[in-house]
Image (cartoon, rainbow, N blue to C red):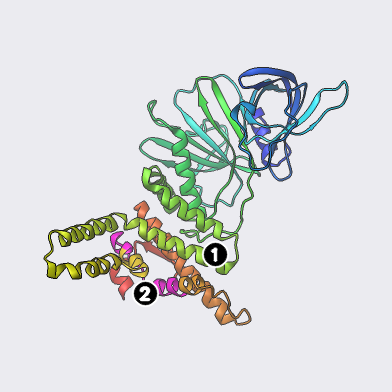
Amino acid sequence: MTVKERILNAHATKTLDETLLELSVFKDGNLVASGDGKLSVSANGRLQIEVNANIPFNFDSPSRGTIIPDKEFFEITAKTRDNLTFKANKLYAKNITHEVDKPVHALFEPAQVTLLLHTIVQPCSSFEVFITSFECDFYNRHCVGGQITNPVFGDNIAGYWLSVETAETAVGLRKDSDSWMHLKVNSKAANTSNMEKHAIAFLNALRFHVGTYLEFFAYGHTSAEGEEIILTNHKSNNERKFYPPLPDHEFEAAEQLLRCGMEFFLKETCSPVVTALCVCWESRKVTFLAGNLLVCSVVEGLADYILTDANEQYTKLRDLALDLLRKEPSAKESIYLEAFEKCIKSVEFIKSKESIRKAGELLKITITQTELRAWGHLRHRLAHGNFSIDVKSPATIQSEFDHAASVANIVNKFVLALFQYEGVFRDYSVRGHPTCNFPIPLEIQKA
């Protein structure tokens, strides 16, 4: 096991315990103390740095809610037992203890720490993400150990892995440990910039495909200085999935979806969709009925996002009509002008339910009447505070699940269409969730 793998495994399993040597503490750019310390991770996944040094701490902690000035933060550099360069900044001391004739002991909780592994120069840039292990059944490649060099990871490790390529990058995903998955994005050309953006775009597409918000606990990149690994705090993850859009073992469809999704999430206008999907993933953490209301809001928000241009054109036409009305009205006409203005301003371009159907038309997909009725049933009842259902009635419970699945199906269809994906998908508006082709031909949907 390499030093890198040892550190990643220890952090992933929350057993990290690294001795920090040659430790230096800086404040406002000035060296203020030297000592020793330890890097570890708490049971809840937070990084911790314990320091023993005669540091000029401010023992008067600021009041809760006070913004700490930058000059009050510390920066720590050190070496690990494997002679790796260690660095952490934006630090504020906690749990300060001091005994006579002994160094001050303090605890820091950094958001992240950086380790410089070695000094090499890569021929092209790359970016890596290390993700908490998740169920993965869509590998599309296989390497034979010792015989074939993996073109993305650059080693001879045997096993199954995922490969996706875009015009600018080659992406690989595999399970390197029982505790974590390894995502690596390589540039195809020396001038490919911002590899982190490409990695995040693929990660967002992967989250949509898997149906949950995949958390990463470390990431890394190569540069002229060497290979840096940045350890971050663990975050609690939810194992309950939103409705994944593809059936299991659809290897070709998964590869196509991830490629289309990555290209979409590289666009500057993708943030509303990222937010919408985050709400869907978070909805799995709340009460079933309340989660349904969140997903209904996502459908409404996605429809508005899709119809942004149409709504803007309507607003321009409305304002133009009002301007024409205001131009030199006769005395007889002026008495009606105020009422007429109010009437025009009160007209909405399209109501919420109609906007969902119109958004589907704009994307050249059909949102079925079953799906629209399910959205209306859940959205309006829950929005008006009616969270009561007959939990003793299997038929009622089944009906609620059917409605929820149909609304989730709208989300998946919207996102798949925004990706410009064509292929198989799982239709949640039908019990049994059959596999269908996307987009479904209009004549079949209307039948």
Where on the picture, by quarter, is residue 350? bottom left
Secondary structure of the residue carrying tag 2 is helix
**Mark toward the viewer: 1 or 2:** 1
Say whether residue 161 is left or right of residue 104.
left
Q: Earlier in the sequence, mark 1 or mark 2?
A: 1
Say whether residue 447 is left or right of residue 158.
left
Amino acid of disc 1: Gly
Which is nearer the eye, 417 or 270?
270
Q: In the drawing, what numbered circle is on residue 410?
A: none
The residue that mark 2 highlights is 369
Does the magenta run of residues contain 363?
A: yes
Q: Residue at x 56, y 48 (%)?
A: 214
Q: Is residue 214 above or below residue 32?
A: below
- Residue 126 in the image: x percent, y percent? 48, 31
Q: How many marks?
A: 2
User: Circle 1: is it few (<14), some (14-19), or many (20+) Cα within 10 Å?
Assistant: some
Amino acid of disc 2: Gln
Q: Is residue 222 above or below residue 285?
A: above
Where on the picture, by quarter, is residue 86? top right
Which segment is the magenta one? 359-377
Does the magenta run of residues contain 322?
A: no
Where on the picture, by quarter, is residue 218? top right
- Pick the quarter of the image with the N terminus: top right
- Residue 135 in the image: x percent, y percent? 58, 52
Q: Residue at x 18, y 61 (%)?
A: 321
The residue that mark 1 highlights is 291
- Pick the quarter of the image with the C terminus: bottom left
Say whether residue 122 is left or right of residue 28.
left
CA distance for labels 1 and 2:
22 Å
